[in-house]
Image (cartoon, grey):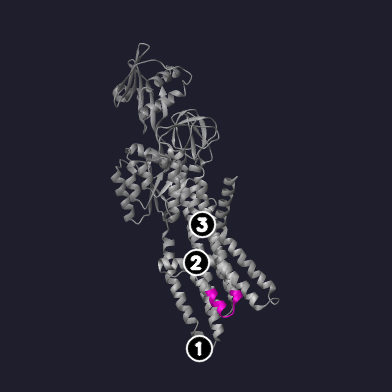
Amino acid sequence: MEDIKANQHSFFITNLKVHGEIIAAAISGILILTAWILSGHIENSLWISLLVASFLIGGFAKAKEGITETYKTGQLNVELLMIIAAVGAASIGYWAEGAILIFIFSLSGALESYTENKNKNELENLMKLQPETATLLNGEVTAIDQLKPGDQIMVKTGERIPADGVIIKGDTTVDESALSGESIPIIKAIGDEVFAGTVNLSGGLHIEINTLPTETMFQKIIELVQNAHEERSPSQQFIERFEGLYVKIVLLTVAVMMVLPHYLFGWTWTDTIYRAMILLVVASPCALVASIMPATLSAISNGARQGILFKGGVYVESLAKLDAVALDKTGTLTKGEPAVVDFFIDPRQDTKYLASIIYTMESESIHPLANAMKEWAGTYQKEQAELSVSVQHHNGKGLSAEIDDVSWLIGNAELVGTQDAEQFLKAFNIQEQATTNIFMRKAAKIIAVFMLKDTLRQDAIAAIQELHHLGLRAIMLTGDNQATAKSIAQEAGITEFHANCLPEDKVNYLKQLRKQNQVTAMVGDGINDAPALATANIGVAMGAGSDIALETANVVLMKNNLGKMVNAIRISKKMNTIVKQNIVFSLAVITVLIASNFLQVINMPLGVIGHEGSTILVILNGLRMLKGD
């Protein structure tokens, strides 16, 4: 019972801190409303007391923030301007106007804090997705931070997977939307990797941990989002530097305004000081300061929900300025695994029997080409038992075996006989392709050929089309030969490509683009891509890539989905559009309000409403980034 009360108290305190500013603003507003309703019915001293209470309650948080910030940095800020304006208005008898200023200013500040809390809550909700405990195979429940590589755990249907690892028993479908943003569950079986924070949907699993709890993909995502929230975009950094200078200019102008109009235009001292106080309010850059940060934080949170991890506001802003996108081929445009894309078998042969032979022989090899051949064969002979044979390996060439007193060879043209391989292709009019050809020889005769290549990702073609639609150059940089590079480029719809690239060649090409004033993003996944990722204006890593690529990159696309690159660019463009709207709108409002004050056509309440209203509007406009791209 005591624990429950303690938790309830903690919950209350946490919520009070989060919502404290909005509560204070509400109380301030209620006091002003009460003073207005009772005006003329109560003593003047009581009426002023209500407004003073509104001052203190509504203005405390912002006054404290402004004074503390000024003390730390030695720079003046907009919070101090607002407090000075409110006190100045009260000092010449405009208590209600000063209180209204404090109320609306505290309301806009509460809304800005809400924006920051909203983004923090999204991060906290993400952190809650990882379980705090795991169940070992012996039934013992242990804390996540006690797990280490090699430990084996079990996960029941419907439970979240507590740590990264490999399935050693069971098969299931896994909801990986928390990591990748993809809603379609992924089929997983023995040998497949699973990640912390994802949901086991349909079957009990035994998993062997292969990563420390502090180094899981889930923890990396949390760290990236946390760091990104702390980064400032170039525009935000400029506004923050500009704020201090602008505040000094405003204060100097106000000081002049408190004296000069009295002598130049014959205004009374009360009118002169009153107009100076209005100028102090309307010239304050609150809306300008709030134009960027809420939109940037919202964009980072939006991206994280979609499986796009920005490492800082600078990269969210910069993606919109891209001229070109350079892409690695293997693992980025393609799956990074060879597959049988075509084959020809002598019509006189039994395909299913040959598949059994291939499956048996290739099962003895761990070569990527062998895995591709085995996968092809598996589609024909799933229910047949494997043959028991002794397979001989011919390094770099293929395999041989004796089965049913017949010699079999599976490998390249050199293994089966180059001349015989060429004759087989000619005899059956098989066209030369940009593929790796694997031949099958039975005794003294070649009976089949299989064409293998690294296949294009399903999302790659659509992504390239979208990049072109956005007006960007798509350039493929690959270490493969010219024929293979040309084939993949044509399939993907890429007209610019460079083959036979070593890591330094990719770096040199990106340097050439920078010299041409081309803002370029490099998308890659391998260790060999890390130098290029670091050289490009923006490095983008595929989520399943090497650790060094993920560390070097500025943006990470989860689940190796190239389409997310397009989404990231669209998020950037939308954010930049919103920021521009906010800046233009806030400057226009400030200009109009200053002009109106000099013409004496607005009073303090209207100035407050115009100024603080514009601040609220730009914050709300920035919050639109929390929605889809």
**Label 3 crowd (10 A; few <14 / some 14-19 / many >=20):** some
Instruction: Give 520 or 54, whichever is nearer the viewer.
Output: 54
Q: Mark 2 points at which residue?
A: 64
Determine the CA span between mark 1 and mark 2. Answer: 37 Å
Instruction: For marks 1 and 2, give the one nearer the viewer.
Output: 2
Q: Which amino acid does label 3 sit on?
A: Glu
- Disc nearer the start of the sequence (1/2): 2
Which mark, by number, is residue 116? Answer: 3
Q: Is residue 335 magenta?
A: no
Image location of residue 216, percent across then percent down: 43, 41
Could you tell me if the residues under marks 1 and 2 are in contact, i.e. CB atoms within 8 Å? Answer: no
Q: Name the residue under label 1.
A: 263
Quadrant position of residue 315: bottom left
**39 sits left or right of 23 in the view:** right
Q: What residue type is labelled 2?
A: Lys
Quadrant position of residue 39: bottom right
